[in-house]
Image (spheres, helix red, strand yellow):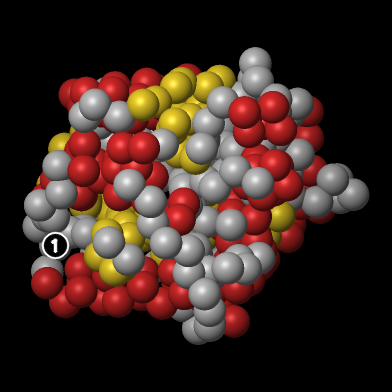
Amino acid sequence: MTVATVPDIATLRIGVLCGGDSPERPGSLASGQHAYNALSAAGLTAELVDVADASVSALKDNIDVALLGLHGLGGEDGKVQGALETAGIPYSGSGVLASALGMHKPTFKKLITQARIDTPSWTVVDPGLSVDAMLSVVRHSIGFPVFVKPSSGGGSLAAGIAWDDATLRPMIEAAADSGQYAEYLIEEYVPGIPCTVGLVQVDGRLVVLPVHDVESKNEFYDYAAKHDPDQRVEHCPSILPDLTTQTMAHTAQAVYHLLGAHGVLRIDYMASSTGRNPLLEVNTLPGLSEHGNLATMARAGGIPYSELIQHLVRTAFTKPAYLP
């Protein structure tokens, strides 16, 4: 495939797209602001763009490339990527198809299951079933405990553990009444240490970053623990056995190619005490905050934050001539 020449980004107007109207808006605004600050400090021409206030199609006259700092629905799911394709604006990260596949957890889990990659067993909350029928499905097909989360969401928002029928019932009822997310996933809860592996393209070469692990002081690695360092203990590089982290890194590369991802990807695992390390989910647009997981892994891999952000901008120009 033909790959476009990467221009000198010092000559470009870089639009840092963030915000939007998803439930993950606050995290996206932080990602965008940190990335914008890094680009500006490096002497590059950058503009912070809140997509809740701007038409993507109208950006063509103002920016030459889009760095995506978007989180959640409307940003990670391929919709903005499609709008940028239509407008003819190069953008960082994966294309429409990989973004959509990665965002919708049930579809992604079907994909990796077919590739014989271990992931917790799951089902989707069926609005056509009564709560009692849904509880029966979970009880007999998965068993307790289970983890409940939106099928297309992140940041551990609207997520939690259900230990039995009594704790799952109100979660299913809340899912049915939720106006934020259209669909919820119920999956086998695997206790253990949450881990993540980052991959980033550097000068056209895919680099696997050191594995990051974290111990949450809360019931699970929830939204609060992800945003308050006092509620977690993290290690990067990971202190898990080398064989465990090497296997995660190897699987992460396979998932990158299976998904058809481009430029950057973050893959989340659970390292259990039994030796099982199932893949939980994938993130085609990892957060760009200076102290977030991707930046932490990059620093551990010898890539300073400012350089990481610039590498991500360049991924907009290393895509194949046609990327679905």
Q: Is residue 168 left or right of residue 204?
A: right
Kind of residue at badge 1: Leu
Question: In terms of depth relative to the viewer, which is nearer, 154 or 47?
Answer: 47
Quick check: 101 left or right of 209? right
Q: Farthest residue toward the right?
A: 128
Rendered view: 222 above or below 123: above
Q: Does 216 sit left or right of 239 as displayed?
A: right
How many numbered marks appear? 1
Quarter-of-image position of residue 245: bottom left
Could you tell me which residue is drawn at 78 percent across and 35 percent down? 176
Residue 155 picture location, percent across and down: 46, 36
Q: Residue furthest top?
A: 53
Residue under numbered circle 1 = 240
Identity of the residue drawn at 32% across and 60% down: 201
**Residue at disc 1, secondary structure:** loop
Q: Is residue 55 visible?
A: yes
- Residue under the image location 60 percent in, 38 percent down: 75
Q: Is residue 24 visible?
A: no
Report x, y in % for residue 37: 29, 22
* Observer-nearest of 282 and 28: 28
Residue 143 drawn above or below residue 81 = below
Tell me what residue is drawn at x 51 percent, y 37 percent: 64
Between residues 208 and 161, which one lies in front from this camera angle?
Answer: 208
Quadrant in the picture for the C terminus:
bottom right
Could you say which is closer to the camera, residue 40 or residue 100? 40
Q: Position of residue 108 (x, y in %)?
A: 59, 64
Residue 148 found in image quarter: top right
Q: Would you place residue 188 above or below residue 154 in this image? A: below
Q: Which class describes the residues within 10 Å of circle 1: few (<14), some (14-19), or many (20+)?
A: some
